[in-house]
Structures are given as C-alpha cells and as structure tokens.
Image (cartoon, rainbow, N blue to C red):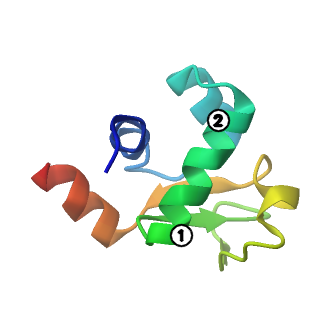
C-alpha cells in the first residue's frame, strides 16, 4: 500500500463524498480519482452512488463517469490493511 493510499484510507472510515475527499487530501481531482480507482481495484474501498446508502459495484468502464459524484468507504479488508501497516 502506497502512502497516498494509506492517507486516503485514513479518511474513509465513514462514507465520504468525492468533494470532501478533495478538500481533506489536497490532491488534484485527477490524482484523487486515480487513487480511488486503484483502491477499488484492490477491494480496499467501496463506492456509493447516487446516494450514500446505495452501494455501486465497481466497473472499470463506467467509473470515470460517476467517480466525482460518488461517495466512498473503506471495506473491511481496507480497514484491516490500514490498521496493520
């Protein structure tokens, strides 16, 4: 797990919208989107869209279209990795 991934997981103990992650991490939007994509591909986070209660399965082809409107949460595996580092 990279340092940016670790820092991002730090913010995802609760469902958090993309816009809030931008403010909290200070990453450029494109970089944040890339980090989120990497974490989703590893199964370390989950995405929610169109509201914070509706989990959305990760699909590589459609992620870019909704990435900035979605919310994110660390998965159980992500929390375990984050806490054992």
Whether residue 37 appears in this view of the structure is yes
Please provide percent x and percent y for residue 1.
31, 51
* SS category of the residue bearing label 2: helix
Residue 71 position in % (x across, y down): 64, 53
Residue underneath mark 2:
31
Residue 4 position in % (x across, y down): 42, 36
Return the residue nearer the eye: 34 or 51. Answer: 34
Which mark is on residue 41?
Answer: 1
Q: Secondary structure at mark 1?
A: helix
For the point 44% across and 40% down, the residue is 8
Side of 68 relative to 71 (left or right): right
Labels 2 & 1 near each other (Cβ < 8 A): no
Is residue 16 visible in the rendered structure shown here?
no
* Residue depicted at 61% across the width and 64% down the height: 47
Q: CA distance from mark 2 to mark 1?
A: 15 Å
Where, by quadrant of the figure, is residue 66 drawn? bottom right
Which residue in the rendered view is the most extreme toward the left? 84
Q: Which of the labelled discs sits on residue 9, or is there none?
A: none
Looking at the image, the residue that sits furthest to the front is 2
30 relative position to 66: left or right: left
């Amino acid at each position: 797990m990279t340092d940016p991934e670790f820092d991002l997981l730090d913010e995802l103990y609760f469902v958090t919208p993309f816009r809030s992650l931008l403010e909290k991490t200070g990453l450029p939007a494109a970089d944040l989107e890339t980090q989120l994509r990497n974490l989703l591909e590893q199964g370390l986070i989950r995405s929610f869209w169109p509201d914070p209660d509706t989990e959305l399965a990760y699909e590589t082809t459609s992620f870019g279209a909704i990435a900035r409107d979605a919310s994110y949460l660390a998965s159980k595996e992500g929390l375990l990795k984050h806490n054992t580092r």
